[in-house]
Amino acid sequence: MAGAQYRLVVRQGPIPGQIFELNRNEISIGRDIANDFVINDAEVSRKHAKLTLEGDRYKIEDLNSTNGTYIDGQRLIGPHVLAIGEIIMFGDNVGVILDGEPARPELTAPSKVDLGMTPVAAIPAPAESIAKPVEPVTPQMSNIPILQQALPEAEVEQVVESGKKPVNTWILAGFGCLLVILVLLIALLVFIDQPWNSGGGLYCVSPFDIIFRSLGYCP
């Protein structure tokens, strides 16, 4: 084999991980115990397939099996020269992979994804699709209007001119009204008690006569 070393590694089947070294020019595969590589599975025919060494590579043929032989998902309809890394399915239940060290590196098949054995890695999201954090906006005090309570113009002028608190005009008006009412009440009492005869009135009785006699109300 010019230094080439090949083996079949069971990836799916009755004994996963089983390794069968390919060290003969012709190797028979099947369920029958007379085969070189015995696979005890109902999907595998008694004489299922055959490997033949040609130069430094193995060729595989399906021996008219019931459930067929597949190479990387494609059913085998004629002889096929194997390459390192190719997945071989015998029916639907048994899968093996060709492994080893070929005499020439170009005899290695491109790596393929085995969905049944290889976990799917998470794909990172593009940088532009990641939402950037929103920076908080600090309000500037210069942009906030300051509310001021407007004072009446008259009170403002009084405060500016005198520098004192404005005088409540309602108190002055109240005192003025009380004074007017008091004067009217005195005048009414004087009018009611006006001396219409020589005997005088209430104001001519002591001690009020002292004041009202001098005013001419008492005889």
Image (cartoon, rainbow, N blue to C red):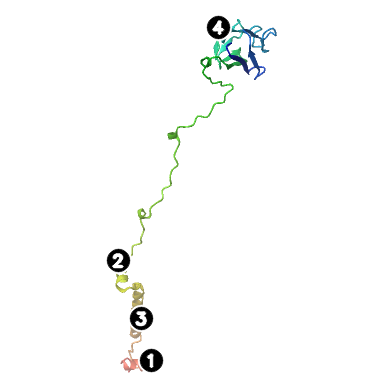
Front position among marks 3 and 4:
4
Check the image and name the residue furthest to the front.
Answer: 2
Q: Disc 3 versus disc 1: distance between alpha carbons?
A: 18 Å
Front position among marks 2 and 4:
4
Q: Disc 1 versus disc 4: distance between alpha carbons?
A: 154 Å
Q: Which residue is under mark 2?
A: 153
Judging depth in this view, the residue of 150 and 21 nearest the camera is 21
Q: Write down the quadrant of residue 144 in the picture.
A: bottom left
Helix, strand or loop for disc 4: loop
Q: Residue at x 44, y 34 (%)?
A: 127
**Label pair 1/2, CB-CB below 8 angstroms:** no
Check the image and name the residue furthest to the top.
Answer: 64
Tag 3: residue type?
A: Leu
User: Relative to residue 218, is residue 63 depicted above or below?
Assistant: above
**Label pair 2/3, CB-CB below 8 angstroms:** no
Tag 4: residue type?
A: Pro
Q: Which mark is residue 208?
A: 1
Q: Which mark is residue 79?
A: 4
Instruction: Determine whether, in the image, residue 68 is placed left or right of residue 201.
Output: right
Helix, strand or loop for disc 3: helix
Q: Quadrant of the N terminus?
A: top right
Q: Disc 3 versus disc 4: distance between alpha carbons?
A: 138 Å
Helix, strand or loop for disc 1: loop
Q: Write down the quadrant of residue 114 in the picture.
A: top right
**Label pair 3/1, CB-CB below 8 angstroms:** no
Indicate the position of residue 165 as horizontal and vertical percent values: 35, 72
- Crowdedness of circle 1 by 10 Å Cα count: few (<14), some, many (20+)? few
